[in-house]
Image (spheres, rainbow, N blue to C red):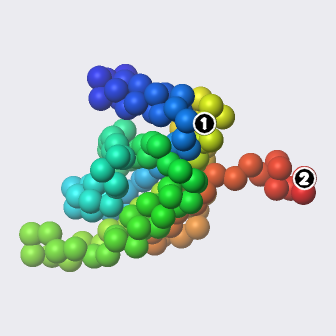
């Protein structure tokens, strides 16, 4: 784990220990990364933290949320902002799979929250080639109801 990843994990753990909801968005850029990253960073509120975790994967920390729906608004805003852009004179389509997981204060550990957001991202990727986002849901609870 590099220093940037360590700092991101530490910031997430601090947010989870606070008295507000905390969200993680795991995002797989299904396009050229440089223009995608610019659009992504522009769509994250100032209180959020963006970290690149792989060649085309990013995580976004949304701390201090008053309610979970704020994370859904950010994910939807990012998804809706991914329209084609011109890069070096050519039109480049931007697309992503975005997974959202939210924790109430003290509910989840960093690893649990990160795992849930990755699961939601994989589900979003299965939906289709266009930009999609999905919220983590406990499948065992849904099927039991």
Tell me if I can see residue 45 in this picture: yes
The answer to which quarter of the image holds residue 30 is: bottom left
Q: Please report the residue visible at 36 percent of the width from the left and 38 percent of the height from the top.
A: 53
* SS at mark 1 in the image: loop
Measure how far apart labels 1 and 2 are at the Cα level.
25 Å
* SS at mark 2 in the image: helix
Residue annotated with mark 1: 105
Residue annotated with mark 2: 144
- Most foreground residue, 27 or 64: 64
**In screen coordinates, is 93 left or right of 128?**
left
Q: Please report the residue visible at 37 percent of the width from the left and 24 percent of the height from the top.
A: 6
**In screen coordinates, is 88 left or right of 120?**
left
Measured from the top left, where is residue 32 in percent x and y?
27, 60
The answer to which quarter of the image holds residue 123 is: bottom right
**In screen coordinates, is 91 left or right of 30?**
left
67 up-or-down from 96: above or below: above
Tell me if I can see residue 33 in this picture: no
Residue placed furthest toward the right: 144
């Amino acid at each position: 784990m590099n220093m940037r990843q360590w700092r991101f994990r530490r910031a997430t753990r601090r947010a989870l220990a606070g008295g507000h909801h905390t969200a993680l968005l795991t995002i797989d850029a299904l396009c050229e990364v440089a223009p995608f990253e610019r659009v992504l960073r522009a769509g994250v509120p100032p209180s959020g933290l963006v970290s690149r975790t792989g060649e085309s994967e990013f995580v976004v920390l949304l701390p201090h949320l008053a309610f979970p729906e704020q994370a859904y608004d950010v994910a939807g805003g990012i998804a809706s902002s991914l329209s084609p852009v011109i890069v070096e004179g050519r039109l480049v389509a931007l697309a992503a799979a975005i997974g959202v997981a939210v924790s109430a204060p003290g509910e989840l550990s960093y690893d649990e929250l990160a795992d849930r957001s990755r699961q939601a991202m994989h589900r979003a990727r299965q939906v289709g080639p266009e930009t999609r986002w999905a919220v983590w849901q406990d499948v065992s609870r849904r099927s039991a109801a």
